[in-house]
Image: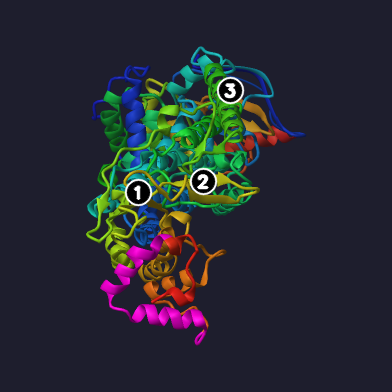
């Protein structure tokens, strides 16, 4: 140590912070530089890639599916990490034996804690927004139709300050080296557990930031494409998370020694306002209902303008009967046309055949418990010229590989189109309709050697032009169920 | 007087750590001596506004630390090095001192210069960017002193500040104390009577929570003169003689 009497003793600095924001900025910068969350960023990025990015990329480039998947799965990555880091920093003063030293400084403890919490939250937000940007950039590059959905990203981002405050409060109020891992695990389990309590569309537990839509169908292909992504539930979730953040940060300022009378009054007000906001948001979530377009609507917040369909220009395949899809699903068109072309070639030009096949918007209805029924609105064939409105398999909350999708299209969708022309359905169909359907679909579901199977073989063996000419003459009678097997050529 | 206490008492449960201490201290270096458990640390913690007294009255820098606004004003002008100095191992020397400069509400524009001066004064200029986890115990002690003096305190409270310092560092530290004591009230709690002899203008000796001696180092030496009290140096003999009298 060098005592330096020769060194000019600096003039006494001013005793009040004339530029408190500049000092707060320096404090924040210091905390940012030495924040444990900074060291966790690579781990968070790796976990995001594993848990969120890769599964999301397995889906087609649909903004709705990817954004909603991200909201749910990114929470599993970020929440325990942020809670753990914040708890670790919240308990820092006590773990390092700094309590006495820091009790003698003039800046209120609450302000000091706020700087540490803010730095932790900043790094978490930087990581989260970076991950979201990467996922959205790749989705945009893959030609996803429409624009990014910001509400799911906003809910995910808003959950970080809230869970950071939760972890920090736990660490500060119960300082121990075990607090961070315990709170991180507890937060993760609690978050996952709350989702298990969701029963129906009016469950208050939907306020959980994990929930991006009707919980049971999750990130469904059919929602938020034909109609807008409803902001009702995200608004409630943001309100809840903001309330939770305010309440937890307020709690930090309540103990004696956190600050002066004004600080404690302010934090008491903050806690009260936060609790009120969180409770109100939870109550609002409990008034939700599944709207026909598959989103949760909150009556008190609902804007009817959001119920209008989103205008779009369909993309159509070059098939004898044009098959048109919503542009968001354009990537499915080649699979669809390849699977349906043989059937459409047989049906084109037949009386009663559709002039065009359009993808329909799904209609959702809440069943008991968490059940949701998904169906097409209105009759399948309607309009002039007649258009067949179809729901594709992926709109029915069924995920499938390309091969599975092709198989599903050839069996179910093609049969649905065929039935709309020749009549009959799965429950009520004549032998002649069954034979013609088997011949056109080239399926072998009929008992071998049965009269129906023999008639189907006979009909299938005809040249396509002969088959088409016969169908042109007899399709009305076939649809009406007036033909017998013997009358088939 | 920068420090004025009247009948100051602090209890921890049934244990009375400080028992009715009345003390006045103005600018200069004030040594606080006493055996282990005498109540020195509890007295310093009360003077540092870390813990409130159980009873009695304190005035620090002309203000009442029992009132939040006045306590905050006192803290802006206070430096404190506790006996067990904690630190954040990931911070560098400069960052740690800057952290305290900001927490003591130094104006942001003055922080950089004040930190540089404090770090230089404790002789850690060449270690300014070293992480605290890499420093020796003596260096950490100096970092603690740097954070205490970064705000040019009018009241500086040092609890066992020379523990862990080597002889050369202690000599330099005493010089720093004398320098600081020209303008501020510096209260140093220590076991090492030679530190008191070399640096202090006033000394108090505590035993069982009470001040049993208050005077100059020369007066303490005089109390030991001509006695058979234990000690290798006159000051040590004075110390032992006063304690023996207090215990009898």
Please tell me which residue lies in front, A403 or B66. A403
**Drawn side of residue A431 relative to residue B119, left or right:** right
Colour theme: rainbow
Image side of residue A16 versus residue A279, left or right: left
Provide residue B121's location: percent of width, then percent of height: 31, 35
Q: Which quadrant of the structure image shows residue B94?
A: top left
Badge 3 and badge 1 in a common chain? yes
Report x, y in % for residue A362: 45, 48
Q: CA distance from mark 3 to mark 1?
A: 66 Å
Check residue A281 in the rendering and tell me which mark sits there, or answer none.
Answer: none
Q: Nearer the viewer, residue B61 or A248?
A: A248
Q: Please identify the dominant SS of the magenta region.
A: helix
Is residue B172 at all visible to an observer of this figure? no
Mark 3 falls on what kind of element?
A: helix
Q: Which mark is residue A268?
A: 3
**Placement of the N terminus of chain A among the 4 image quadrants:** top left
User: Is A241 part of what is drawn in magenta?
Assistant: no
Q: Single out the mark in the foreground, 2 or 3.
A: 2
Depicted A166 relative to depicted A26: above or below:
below
The boundaries of the magenta stretch are A448-476
Would you say residue A317 is visible in this rendering?
yes
Q: Nearer the viewer, mark 1 or mark 2?
A: 1
Residue A462, magenta (yes or no): yes
Q: With A457 as the anchor, is B110 left or right in this view?
A: left
- Residue drawn 64% across the image and 27% down it: B211
Q: Nearer the N terminus, badge 2 or badge 3?
A: 3
Which label sits on residue A386? 1
Mark number displayed over residue A364: 2
- How crowded pointer 3 is (Cα within 10 Å; few <14, some 14-19, many 20+) is rated as some
């Amino acid at each position: 140590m060098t005592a330096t009497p020769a060194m000019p003793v600096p003039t006494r600095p001013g005793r009040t912070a004339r530029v408190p924001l500049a000092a707060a900025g320096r404090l924040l910068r210091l905390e940012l530089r030495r924040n444990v969350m900074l060291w966790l960023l690579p781990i968070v990025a790796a976990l995001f890639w594993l848990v969120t990015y890769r599964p999301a990329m397995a889906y087609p480039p649909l903004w709705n599916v990817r954004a909603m998947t991200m909201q749910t799965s990114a929470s599993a990555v970020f929440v325990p990490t942020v809670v753990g880091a914040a708890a670790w920093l919240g308990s820092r003063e006590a773990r390092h034996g700094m309590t006495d030293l820091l009790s003698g400084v003039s800046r209120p403890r609450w302000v000091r804690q706020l700087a540490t919490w803010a730095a932790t939250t900043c790094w978490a937000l930087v990581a989260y927004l970076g991950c979201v940007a990467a996922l959205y950039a790749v989705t945009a590059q893959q030609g996803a139709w429409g624009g990014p959905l910001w509400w799911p990203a906003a809910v995910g981002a808003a959950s970080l300050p809230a869970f950071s405050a939760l972890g920090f409060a736990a660490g500060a109020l119960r300082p121990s080296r075990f607090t961070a891992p315990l709170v991180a695990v507890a937060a993760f389990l609690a978050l996952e557990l709350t989702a298990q309590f969701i029963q129906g569309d009016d469950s208050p537990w939907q306020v959980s930031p994990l929930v991006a839509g009707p919980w049971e169908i999750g990130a469904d292909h059919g929602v938020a494409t034909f109609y807008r992504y409803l902001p009702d539930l995200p608004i409630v979730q943001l309100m809840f998370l903001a309330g939770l953040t305010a309440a937890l940060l307020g709690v930090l300022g309540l103990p004696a020694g956190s600050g002066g009378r004004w600080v404690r009054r302010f934090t008491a007000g903050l806690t009260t306002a936060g609790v009120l906001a969180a409770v109100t948001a939870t109550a609002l979530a409990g008034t939700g209902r599944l709207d026909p377009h598959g989103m949760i609507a909150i009556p008190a917040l609902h804007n009817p303008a959001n119920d209008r369909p989103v205008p779009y220009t369909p993309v159509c395949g070059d098939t004898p009967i044009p098959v048109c899809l919503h542009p968001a699903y354009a990537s499915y068109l080649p699979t669809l046309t390849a699977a349906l072309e043989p059937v459409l070639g047989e049906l084109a030009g037949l009386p009663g055949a559709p002039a065009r096949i359009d993808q329909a918007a799904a209609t959702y209805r809440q069943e008991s418990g968490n059940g949701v029924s998904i169906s097409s609105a209105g009759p399948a064939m309607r309009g002039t010229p007649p258009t067949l409105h179809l729901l594709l398999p992926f709109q029915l909350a069924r995920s499938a590989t390309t091969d599975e999708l092709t198989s599903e299209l050839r069996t179910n969708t093609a049969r649905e189109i065929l039935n709309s022309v020749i009549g009959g359905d799965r429950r009520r169909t004549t032998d002649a309709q069954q034979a013609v359907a088997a011949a056109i679909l080239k399926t072998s579901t009929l008992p071998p050697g049965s009269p129906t199977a023999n008639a189907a073989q006979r009909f299938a063996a005809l040249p396509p032009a002969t088959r088409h000419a016969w169908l042109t003459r007899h399709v009305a009678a076939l649809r009406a169920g007036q033909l017998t097997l013997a009358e088939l050529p | 007087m920068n420090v004025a206490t009247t009948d100051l008492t602090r209890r921890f449960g049934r244990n009375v750590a400080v028992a009715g201490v009345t003390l006045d201290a103005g600018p200069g270096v004030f040594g606080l001596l006493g055996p282990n458990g005498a109540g020195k640390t509890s007295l310093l913690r009360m003077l540092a506004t870390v813990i409130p007294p159980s009873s009695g009255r304190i005035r620090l820098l002309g203000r009442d630390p029992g009132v939040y606004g006045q306590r905050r004003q006192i803290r802006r002008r206070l430096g404190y090095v506790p006996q067990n100095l904690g630190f954040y191992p990931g911070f560098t020397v400069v960052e740690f001192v800057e952290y305290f400069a900001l927490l003591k509400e130094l104006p942001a524009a003055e922080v950089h210069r004040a930190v540089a001066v404090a770090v230089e004064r404790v002789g850690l200029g060449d270690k300014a960017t070293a992480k605290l986890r890499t420093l020796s115990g003596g260096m950490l002690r100096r970092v603690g002193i740097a954070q205490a003096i970064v705000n040019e305190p009018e009241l500086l409270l040092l609890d066992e500040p020379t523990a862990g310092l080597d002889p050369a560092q202690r000599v330099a530290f005493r010089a720093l104390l004398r320098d600081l004591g020209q303008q501020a009230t510096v209260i140093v709690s220590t076991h090492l009577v030679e530190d008191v002899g070399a640096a202090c203008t006033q000394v108090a000796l505590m035993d069982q929570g009470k001040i049993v001696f208050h005077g100059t180092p020369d007066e303490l030496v005089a109390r030991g003169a001509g006695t058979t009290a234990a000690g290798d140096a006159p000051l040590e003999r004075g110390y032992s003689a006063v304690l023996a009298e207090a215990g009898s």
